[in-house]
Amino acid sequence: MIRLYHVVKSYGEHHALDDVSLTIDKGEFVYVTGPSGAGKSTLLKLLYGAERPTSGKLLVGGVDVAALPRGRLPQLRRNVGIVFQDFKLLPRRTVGANVALALEVVNAPPEQVRRRVPAVLNIVGLKEREDSLAGELSGGEQQRVAIARAIVNDPAVLFADEPTGNLDGAMAVEVMEILQAVNLRGTTVLVATHDVGLMDRFPHRRVRFEGGRLVQSPQSRARS
């Protein structure tokens, strides 16, 4: 599903990622971990096309992201879901409208929007909040809306960048349970986090970065 070959990302003299090679198989749930500034967020930005590598090759679902013209990035992102630490919701729009936006930007038919939005809100336990304003929800609820928006297109891969960083313990556990459920439905999931407690509670493969270098990458444990 994801292949990196000798990837370097530099900002001037600083290497945010330094000669990273990595394989993540279809259906895996993988933690991208390490201290702040290790390169976790940079890696995810490269994989969903927000940044370009200085050198090296990145394949996501067989697509060379580094070589993809900017005009084709929306096509890539139809198969990719992204969850951010700060939610990135529109607070004055309803929960349903926030989730529907991900379908509308890819010109999904109205009937598909009407069908998919309540279905995916049911997955994250927020079907009854569809008509609530996003800005009126708790932090945990807002993150669940963000996950619903990320998976409404049924993506092949889901990237989550510190998805529990702004949440308390109970809400963080709820979010991790949802991400696990998404993975069990067949989606490849990458979670950037430094929360050791959550990784211990929800054990999956960990790949660790320090100073932009991949220092630990256990063998794939993808389901057969």
Image (tube, rainbow, N blue to C red):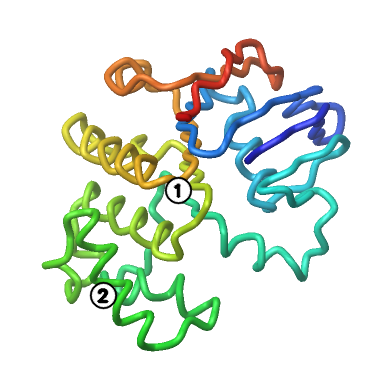
- What residue is drawn where x is 50% and y is 36%? 190
The picture places residue 101, in percent across and down from the top left corner, at 43, 75
Q: In the depicted view, which residue is nearer to us: 17 or 149?
A: 149
Compared to 214, does 70 lie above or below?
below
The answer for how far apart the CA atoms under marks 1 and 2 are is: 19 Å
Give the quadrant of residue 24.
top right
Residue at (29, 78) in percent of width and height: 115
Label at residue 217: none
Question: Residue flagged by tag 2: what amino acid is it?
Answer: Thr
The answer to whether residue 85 is above or below residue 128 is above
Left or right: 96, with 27 as reference point: left
Regarding mark 2 in the picture, which secondary structure is present there? loop
Q: Is residue 214 left or right of residue 194?
A: right
Q: Tell which circle, 1 or 2, labels the residue nearer the N-terminal end.
A: 1
Q: Which residue is mark 2?
A: 94
As drawn, the residue found furthest toward the bottom would be: 110
**Callout 1: few (<14), some (14-19), or many (20+) C-alpha neighbours within 10 Å?**
some
Q: Nearer the viewer, residue 94 or 198?
A: 198
User: Residue 196: x and y, percent?
Assistant: 37, 16
Q: Which mark is residue 84?
A: 1
Picture quarter with the N terminus: top right
